[in-house]
Image (spheres, coloured by chain):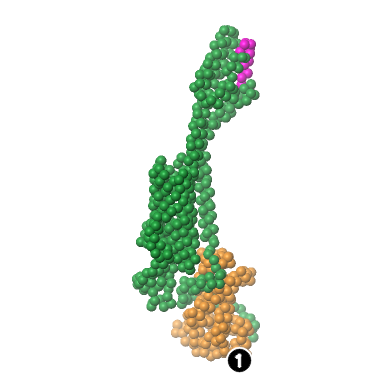
Amino acid sequence: MEKLEEIIEGCKRRETLYQERLYRHFYPALYTRCKTFFTDEHDIITALNNGMLRVFAQIDKYDPAKGNFYSWLHAVVRNTALTFLRDSKQFRTTELTEEVYESLGENPFNRFKWEELFKLLSGLPTDTRAVVVLFYVESFSIKEISAMLQMKEGTVKWHLSEGRKKLRNILKPEAFSER
Amino acid sequence: MKDKQDHNYKNFGGDFPKPGTPADEAWSQMHELLVKHDLTKPAKKDKRRLIIFLLVFLFITAGISGYLFFSNNAGNKAALSIVPDKIDQQNEPGSMGNDTVAYQNSEQDKNRYIPDEEKAFSNTGKTNSISKNYSLKSFNKTNAENNEFTAIQQTGIEKTEQPANAPAKESTQNYNRANDTVVTVHQNILMDTATKNTSLIENTTAKSNKTTASKNKFHFGLQWNANFSLKNNSHYFDAYNGGKQYYMWLLPAAWAKMDIGKKHGILFQFNPYKQVFAGKQTVHIEVPWIASVDPDIVTRVVKTRGYDFGLKYEYKFNSRMHIAAGLSYTFQQDALYAEQAVEHTSGNVLSEKIYGAKRSDASFDYLKSSYLNWNGSVKYDLKKLSIGAGVSKPFSNLSADPTYTVKPLNGELYLQYRFK
């Protein structure tokens, strides 16, 4: 297996062989990330491939000095997935004015395996799910989420509140027999 | 409220669950997108490696050829080098035995080696003219020009006898001493002349052989190839357009050969219709969305055709038998596929469709556009016509998808006609 730098160089030359190697190398990780936003297989693959299309088109812009490749790749794919979410117009605009999410504190999702996480998230509506994932799993601030999803901060808070309400019961340790 | 939080990727770096969609299928969709947006092109690296490999092979072949060519002439060179060697020996002090050879070198040399005898003759006051009679300069010159060993030998004897007999009348001590010297010298003259003449004869023969060899150095002609699969093929007469074409089993090619010495040669071949039977090896599998219900679509390559450039080293066993080995580079133009519907669980073939693909077709993407082969063959000459048999196998994978390896071993029978 070639080094990642060599694969990236091959992708910059737009050579299929290296594009495929890069794609296959990161496929499980990116698929998992996309699955946190979508439940439908087709949506997951569409979001992932749209993201990778942007990666391959803009790989010349990747600067190793600014961070590792996976961070950049993940950011591009995630942003494309969020664009895909926004375009699907499944976002509601209800706002919450209470200041209840000052900080993240301990991430309650860190206790779960991926499959368990998917199971938890599957109970949430698409828009709430995206906000919850960005806040809890991806660790973005409300302000950042607001900018990313192009929604008001109050709306982000409302989605978080909704998510917490729906997950309240299942987030309890006893909800998973093995824990 | 925090504006920005530290990113804490969960389970970053591994332990991801198995994706619901196989990577092959996802990549297939991705590849279609890349093609659609013109963001991809075939890898160049493999080609570069092949070209480097081919160049290295050419250099090695040229090196071997050069070595063989020059080593064949080594014998001739050795014969030619006799005289300079003797001249070198002449220059060593006290090497009297080769005095005669010095005559042909220069006047200066002549004067350097003759004085002993000339002094002797000059002491008699009568022998200068005699010594000039058998001057080796003219003797060897005649030798070289006419290349008539016997006649010169006789002349040499006559001339040698003259000074040996003539001074007998004088009966002086100096004369006797000179006489002895002259006889010795001319015996040496004869021996060296004989050696030199032998060398000259060898040279002439070698030159003559070389002229004959250079006349036969370059050959060219046509060739008709009949490829056959050594494994799993029955589509010999299936054309690439889906029909039947019986000439598909006897395809023309051109060749040119350069002889290097008597036993070696370099053979260049251009084959505009090189055919490779792939033994129905898999190049692509399309797994359906619901695998348990729909069958897998398996695409297998039956055979491919393209133009091919090859270079071979040929060794001649005897006047009729040759063996050859070399490399060739093929640019694929057509392919014949077998598309099979295969039951996912049992692997049973439910149906099969044979279809052809041209380089411009989408399904041609299952194959690499070009690849490198090695090949070996045996040939038997029948005057202008030769018959031969060989094997060939691709070095590089014919399949564009590295998941599948397609490197079929093919057999080949051929007729070769020599124009020159």
The residue lying toward the viewer, choosing from B358 and B49, is B358
From where the camera sits, is residue B267 visible?
Answer: no
The residue under label 1 is which amino acid type?
A: Leu
User: Eyeballing the image, is B406 above or below B214?
Assistant: below
Query: Residue B270: x, y in percent?
Result: 48, 53
Q: Secondary structure at mark 1?
A: loop
Q: Is residue B134 magenta?
A: no
The residue lying toward the viewer, choosing from B320 and A80, is B320
User: Eyeballing the image, is B211 above or below B169?
Assistant: below
**Which chain identifier belongs to the orange chain?**
A
Taking the spot 64% from the left edge, 11% from the top edge, the residue there is B125
The answer for which chain carries disc 1 is: A
**Which chain identifier belongs to the green chain?**
B
Using the rendered view, name the quadrant where residue B232 is placed.
bottom left
- The range drawn in magenta is B112-127
User: Eyeballing the image, is B161 above or below B339?
Assistant: above
What secondary structure characterizes most of the magenta part? helix
Query: Residue A73: x, y in percent?
Result: 57, 73
Taking the spot 53% from the left edge, 63% from the top edge, the residue there is B43
The residue lying toward the viewer, choosing from B153 and B29, is B153
Would residue A63 be found to the left or right of residue A175 on screen? right
Q: Which residue is mark 1?
A: A96
